[in-house]
Image: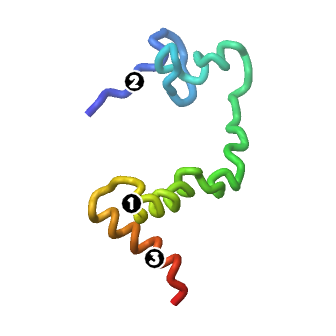
Amino acid sequence: MTAAPRPCGALGEHNGPVRPYAAGWLCSRHSPWGRAGRPVPQPGPGWPADAWDTPSPQSASRVHDAQAIASGKRRSNPAAYRAAQAAVGARKDPK
C-alpha cells in the first residue's frame, strides 16, 4: 500500500484536495493559481459532441486494403487472403 502524498512539503495550513503539479503534490492554497490569488479554475466545455463521429481515414483504408489483398496486389497470409476475397465477393454479389 502506498502512503498518501505529503502536500506541498511546506509547513503551515493546507486546504483543498492535493493534486500533482510540475512542482510536486500541492494543495489548493499552494497551487499555482492559489499563489497568484486567482479563483479555482473551472473545467472547460470539453470536446464537441460530434468529435468522435467523424470517420477516420484508417477505417476507410480497410476497404482498399481488402481489395488489394483479394486481387493479389498486396501480400498477406492465406487466412487474410481468404477473408479479403470473401469480403470483396460479398459486396459484389447482390444475392
Q: Amino acid at mark 2?
A: Pro
The spot of residue 41 in percent (x, y) is 69, 30
Depicted 73 relative to depicted 94: above or below: above
At 53% from the left and 54% from the top, the residue drawn is 61
The answer to which image quadrant residue 44 occupies is top right
Q: Secondary structure at mark 3?
A: helix
- Label 2 and label 1: CA atoms lie apart by 59 Å
The spot of residue 79 in percent (x, y) is 28, 65
Read off the residue under disc 2.
5
Q: Secondary structure at mark 1?
A: loop
Q: Residues within 10 Å of mark 2 (few under 14, many from 20)?
A: few
The spot of residue 55 in percent (x, y) is 62, 56
At 34% from the left and 64% from the top, the residue drawn is 81
The answer to which image quadrant residue 32 occupies is top right
Read off the residue under disc 3.
89
Q: Amino acid at mark 1?
A: Gly
Counting residues from the start of the chain, the first of labels 3 and 1 encountered is 1
Counting residues from the start of the chain, the first of labels 3 and 2 encountered is 2
- In screen coordinates, is 2 left or right of 23? left
Mark 3 or 1: the one toward you: 1
- In screen coordinates, is 66 left or right of 42? left
- Label 3 and label 2: CA atoms lie apart by 60 Å
Q: Secondary structure at mark 2?
A: loop
Mark 2 or 1: the one toward you: 1
> As rendered, which of 65 and 14 lies closer to the eye?
65
Which residue is most to the top? 11
Mark 3 or 2: the one toward you: 3
- Label 3 and label 1: CA atoms lie apart by 14 Å
Read off the residue under disc 1.
72
The spot of residue 64 in percent (x, y) is 52, 58
At 47% from the left and 63% from the top, the residue drawn is 67
Q: Amino acid at mark 3?
A: Gly
